[in-house]
């Protein structure tokens, strides 16, 4: 529901996505992931990659709706860190079972009007 329209990519780009039929596009809202992902960017989420390892950017929900965040597992624990790239926001540390991971962000683009 977060993507609309048809996205077409060159074969060289599609070859890098092993599960192209499971990659979905969604817009980035808010400033919590700036400067990496400014509001208005689009991310492409591979929904086959739902275990947040390695540390990377994922589409997740931990009770406040679908969002894009950097995620890091805390070694030897049941914790997971939810990290915003914008330093104005803090780091959340939650139980892994309290976080739903919808997929890993495998690509993005932004308008540079």
Image: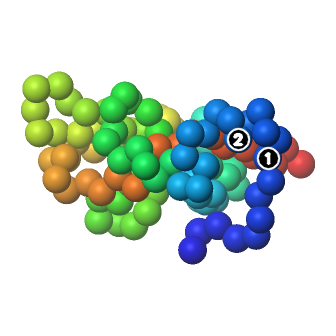
Give the crowd class for mark 2: few <14, some 14-19, many >=20 residues within 10 Å.
Answer: few
Q: Nearer the viewer, residue 42 or 103?
A: 103
Q: Nearer the viewer, residue 33 or 48?
A: 48
Give the crowd class for mark 1: few <14, some 14-19, many >=20 residues within 10 Å.
Answer: few
* Secondary structure of residue under mark 1: loop
Which residue reaches farthest right?
Answer: 113
Question: In x, y percent, where is residue 24?
Answer: 59, 58
Image quarter of the N terminus: bottom right
The label number, if any, that marks residue 14 in the structure image = 2
Which residue reaches farthest top?
Answer: 75
| Disc 1: which residue | 9
Name the quadrant containing residue 80: top left
Is 104 situated left or right of 39 in this image? left
Give the residue at x 41% y 44%: 49
Is 31 situated left or right of 52 in this image? right
Question: In x, y percent, where is residue 11?
Answer: 79, 39
Give the residue at x 47% y 39%: 57
Tell me, yes or no, whether the two marked residues, 2 and 1, touch with CB atoms within 8 Å. yes
Residue 84 in sight here: no
Is 29 situated left or right of 50 in this image? right
Is 54 situated left or right of 87 in this image? left
Give the residue at x 20% y 30%: 74
In the rendered image of this protein, does residue 89 appear above or below residue 39? above
Q: Earlier in the sequence, mark 2 or mark 1?
A: 1
Which residue reaches farthest left?
Answer: 77
Question: In x, y percent, where is residue 62?
Answer: 29, 59
* Secondary structure of residue under mark 2: helix
């Amino acid at each position: 529901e977060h993507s609309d329209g048809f996205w077409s990519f060159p074969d060289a780009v599609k070859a890098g996505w092993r599960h192209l039929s499971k990659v979905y596009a969604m817009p980035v809202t808010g400033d919590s992931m700036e400067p990496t992902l400014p509001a208005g960017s689009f991310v492409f989420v591979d929904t086959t990659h739902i275990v947040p390892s390695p540390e990377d950017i994922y589409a997740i929900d931990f009770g406040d709706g679908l969002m894009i965040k950097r995620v890091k597992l805390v070694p030897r624990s049941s914790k997971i860190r939810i990290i915003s790239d914008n330093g104005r926001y803090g780091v959340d540390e939650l139980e892994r079972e309290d976080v739903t991971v919808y997929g890993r962000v495998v690509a993005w683009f932004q308008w540079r009007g």
